[in-house]
Image (cartoon, rainbow, N blue to C red):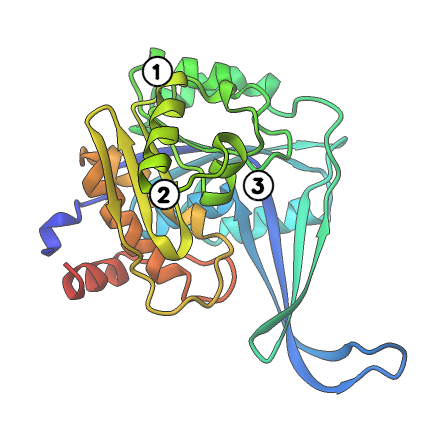
Amino acid sequence: MTHAALPDFAGRRVLVVGDVMLDRYWFGDVERISPEAPVPVVLVRRVEERPGGAANVARNIDALGGEATLLSVIGDDEAGRALERVLAGGRVRASLHRDPDLSTTVKLRVIGHQQQLLRVDFERAPGHEVLAAKLDEYERLVDETDAIVLSDYGKGGLAHVARMIELARAHGKPVLVDPKGSDYARYRGATVLTPNRGEFREVAGRWSDEADLARRAQKLRGELALEALIVTRSEDGMSLFTPAGSRHEATRAREVYDVSGAGDTVIATLSLMVAAGADLPAAMRVANHAAGIVVAKLGTAVVHRGELLESLAANP
């Protein structure tokens, strides 16, 4: 594959809507076991904060050279302010509405000698639909964009996802959805749905072979009136299902270090390729390369255009 297979993403605008979170990392050394319990003692040397969830999707779009607008809701709390601060360091145009009744989700990972030892989640389900009042802003932003990503982490930000898909399609915009949970009916009419292997299995059931997988995928795609379904399958690569049939891409990962956030990178890359006018087989091929790069990095990370070009050139 030549460099020409990667379009110029400059000026390509993607609106990212969904659940955001703050990813915190405590990096340290482990030199002894605690006398209080059989657990390692981590002497923390460094702390990092990174955008997570839909914010990580937006950050990946920015890293690849596209223009990302992020619409979400955060709590009026320390974690929300920290997330605003880390996003301010990039070029993502963030519209983060503060809700005093919401707690910003935090995922804290403790790393010792480059090995994740523990993850602690701080979250509370919202008592109301946190983006309901922002649908007017959403519709205005849809008009200004080339593609829409709806990033559902099941934290309450996309309870009105069906209406968001309807508005996107009414404006003639492609909408890509990273789904969550077992109720996929609310994603009906999306352009592309990108469940991972476990998420797809939860909805479609276990498959016995590739033919059975294709049958189940096409059945779900038809029921939901999707243009395409892309199942990300970890070490088994990715599979694309459209009315024309199916296509598979073997994994490009040379080393799997950390899969956290890989789905964010995949849908970010897909959305930019679609925004640039690429067909879905080409979009999946490039997204598969991006996934192979990001899983070799520690934690929620991004892929830069130069890395993607290098991977495409080395493995056409």
Q: Which mark is residue 308?
A: none
Residue toward you, 26 or 258: 258
Q: In this rendering, would 226 be left or right of 19?
A: left
Q: Is residue 295 above or below residue 177?
A: below
**Residue tagged 3:** 20
* Callout 2–callout 1 Cβ contact below 8 Å: no
- Sequence-wise, the earlier of marks 2 and 1 is 1
Q: Secondary structure at mark 3?
A: strand
Image spot of residue 30 (x, y percent): 69, 83
**Residue tagged 2:** 209
- Amino acid found under the numbered disc labelled 2: Asp
User: How packed is label 3: few (under 14 Cα within 10 Å), some, or many (20 or more)?
Assistant: many
Q: In this rendering, would 72 be left or right of 304?
A: right
Image spot of residue 292 (x, y percent): 34, 59
Label 1 or label 3, whichever lies nearer to me, is: 1
- Amino acid found under the numbered disc labelled 3: Val
* Quadrant of the drawing holding the C terminus: bottom left
Q: Residue furthest right?
A: 36
Spatial separation of the CA atoms under disc 2 and disc 3: 36 Å
**Residue tagged 1:** 169
Image spot of residue 67 (x, y percent): 33, 40
All told, the count of numbered labels is 3
Residue toward you, 56 or 291: 291
Q: Quadrant of residue 293?
A: bottom left
Q: In this rendering, would 249 be left or right of 266?
A: left
- Sequence-wise, the earlier of marks 1 and 3 is 3
Q: Secondary structure at mark 1?
A: helix
- Amino acid found under the numbered disc labelled 1: Arg
Say which residue appears at 48% left-offset and 58% top-offset: 259
Q: In this rendering, would 266 be left or right of 40?
A: left
